[in-house]
Image (cartoon, rainbow, N blue to C red):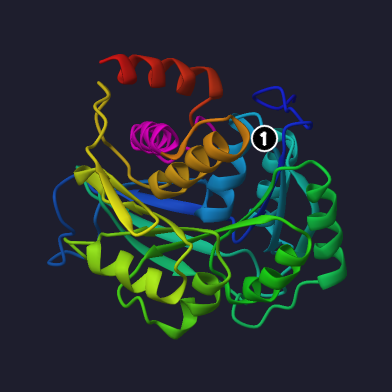
Amino acid sequence: MPPPNPIDRSSGAVVVVGSAGLDTNIYLPGGEIDFTVEANFTENIDYLGQAGGYACRGYIRLGCATSFIGFLGDDFSGDTIRQQLAADGVDLSAVFTDPAGTARSVNIMYPDGRRKNFYDGKSHMTSQPDLEICRAVFRRAAQAQPALAHFNLPNWARQLLPIARQAGLVIACDLQDVIDPNDPYRQDFILQSDILFFSAVNHPNPTPLFECFWQKQPNLILVCGMGAQGAALGTGGNIHFSPPVDLPAPVIDTNGAGDSLAVALLASYLFHGYDLPHALLRGQIAARHACTLRADSSNLIYLATLDKLTVLLSSG
């Protein structure tokens, strides 16, 4: 199967570093789980998900040459993910085997699209990637400047931050749902980033998070996903708040929204020639589109659709 969009290998390259999994979404027929009964009758759907899976598929659909560094199990889930990513056109030469199996998430889904996530990262705290293989992937990507390393947060990934830096790649990290900006686990990712993404789901006012991150790393470009409240972009100590975009299709599943925001903003800013405010708009469009997909990473927004909606919303 050919990739969803023609891949322009002359306009830059992306290395996605993180976890991919075959995830299960459990859709509740009502508003809550009924704990008074033993069995709840739900709709359960498996699909290729998690941050690394969404990011790889998102970049491919925007026409970006994409490599994936991660761990998959020697099991049904791992085989399925390898097949789907290979069919998309993702380079899997730095995919390693986790003896504990493929990482999994179970998402309890509510009718308004909200989720409760239960994540099993398998060996992500102790896995050791082959650093020379990873170095070769980064160097190969760096030949197609601009080159981007898009990091998610498995523990083993922190070892690759200085290697990506040495190879000359722009480093973007997604902290996801930050509770404490001083969380020791996330400090390596914050300090090594050029562009940092995070969710404000735990912070109604994200401004103190911006200030805290700038104290650690003053030159960071900061992007905050705020769900139904929109998004915020921080550069040079200034914060720009952007309202949510309005698309006709309803929000039914928020899985992959934050990943789509990051992917479309980074591709637009680094590869497609947009300035940061317009790249943020395109990221918001991609995130809102992802919320219309039910347990599905195969239909993330395509470049032609993103371009069309950007013109429509910019002129409106």
Query: Based on the displayed image, in which of its 4 quarters is residue 167 positioned?
Result: bottom right
Up/down of 249 relative to 81, above or below:
above
SS of the residue at dot 1? Answer: loop
Quarter of the figure with the N terminus: top right
Q: Is residue 95 above or below residue 14?
A: below
Q: Which residues are magenta?
A: 277-299
Q: Kindly identify the residue that appears in the image at 39 percent across and 66 percent down.
A: 118
Q: Position of residue 32 (x, y in %)?
A: 15, 56
* Residue beneath the point at 22% across and 49% down: 110
Q: Which residue is mark 1?
A: 64
| Residue 169 shown in magenta | no
* Relative image position of residue 281 (x, y in whole percent): 37, 33
Kind of residue indicated by mark 1:
Cys
Report if residue 202 is visible in the image. no
For residue 68, say whether it is visible: yes
Residue positioned 39% across, 19% down in the render? 309
